[in-house]
Amino acid sequence: MLLGLDGVHVEHVDRRDGLLVVTVSTPAAPIGCPSCGVVATGRGRRRRLLHDVPGTTRVRIVWRQRVWRCGDDGCAKKTFVEQVPTLVARRGSITKRAVGWAIGQLRREHATVHGLARQLGTSWKTVWRAVEPELVRLAADEARFEGVTTLGVDEHVWHHVDPRKRGPKELTGMVDLSRDSAGKTRSRLLDLVPGRSGKAYASWLADRGDTFRKNVRVAALDPFAGYKTAINDKLEDATAVLDAFHVVKLGTAAVDEVRRRVQQDTLGHRGRKGDPLYGIQTILRAGAENLTDKQQVRLTTAIEADPAHDEVFVAWQCAQQLRSAYHTKDLAEGQRIAEKVVDTFHTCPIPEIARLGRTLRRWRSAFLAYFTTGRSSNGGTEAVNGIIELHRRLARGYRNRDNYRLRMLLAAGGLTQ
């Protein structure tokens, strides 16, 4: 055994040209022909160069691989070479141990395949051809879908070239948001499928089977009707929950729309430096409890600059009321505020707030479900998207969607060993 390499013993160790070269071979033992089983006779050895896990220097393993000849003259096999699966895959040039090390670097250390190839002293293709089969095997294991009780969904753009050359730009990602015994969310990427549509999500759910679908109790999503339709069709027993961040974002966007409209109505142009409303655009996006005394004065001064600015202030107060529903420590109190928002916003004379109210009324059950499901949200899905963006930048983009899917599943916890 050589540092975890079972089945071989060391014959010689040499350090030269910045390399640690270790010569190994297998113990002598009779072996049968893989075709007919007749005991084979030795026909010498051949030297096979393998790349191993690097240390302070690169490591090369020279395996003196035995060559055998079948003792049966009628066997079609004739000659064959020994194989040690625990050392290296058939026709491979990277040791099993180095493959495991590379997968660990990709998973935990934000490494790139190119960087690993440089450390191993080989090429990108050589590293990926060694790693890919293991990732494919892990991705095909249906056991990784077990125990999912809370499911998140979101989309992202994986490339920015012509779709006719590389296929759909958008991918829909499914994320395990189940909580462990300590209440911590897993945030584990389960899969990436082409397209941004309810059909893509529904097809993936259908492929998972009845057991998986019946086990899902909560389904978090952004306000996209396609995903909601898929949840209603395929996850009949699950409670759909509208993501809190996106709800608050809708309120903030409504305030921005009111500010821009009032700006145009009062001054006849877009906001410019020195305009009262333009000077408070960032203040209007902040929470009231976070404003400093100076910011409070700036807000008051800008609103009082023109009676028409009262619309902006009322819209800001509505957005703050919507936001406060999520910030209350008592879920029952938060639900009462949310119900009041749903029941009143659509009657507001400010058109942007009324439109926001109508949107929330359409999503009423999913909006209020946040307060009955222990603050379930799609935040873990956004965290996974952050990991995906990081690894896409590290790799300077991807050209192959299958490779992209495997790499992101590995980086975002979707593949477990």
Image (cartoon, helix red, strand yellow):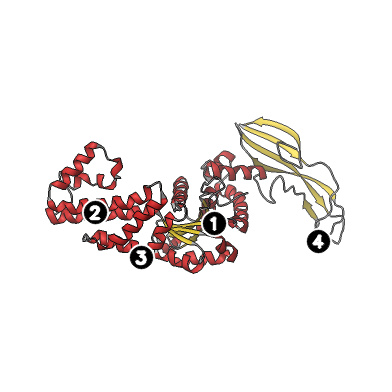
* Residue 110 location (% of width, % of height): 51, 42
Instruction: Say whether disc 4 or disc 1 marks the residue closer to the N-terminus.
Output: 4
Q: Nearer the viewer, residue 403 or 379?
A: 379
Reading the image, the residue beneath label 1 is: 149
The circle on residue 362 is: 3
Please name the amino acid that badge 3 sits on.
Arg
Which of the marked residues, 3 or 2, is nearer the chain's N terminus? Answer: 2
Nearer-the-camera pick, 351 or 380: 351
Q: Secondary structure at mark 1?
A: loop
Q: Closer to the camera, 118 or 105?
A: 105
List the residue tagged with mark 2: 315
* Residue 95 in view (yes/no): no
Give the amino acid type for the residue marked by disc 1 in the picture: Thr
Mark 2 to mark 1: distance in Å?
38 Å
Quadrant of res 368: bottom left
Residue that label 4 marks: 76
Pointer 1 local density, CA inside 10 Å: few below 14, some 14–19, many at least 20: some
Residue at point 28% right, 60% down?
Answer: 344
Estimate the spatial distance between the alpha carbons at disc 4 and disc 1, rounded to whole Å: 55 Å
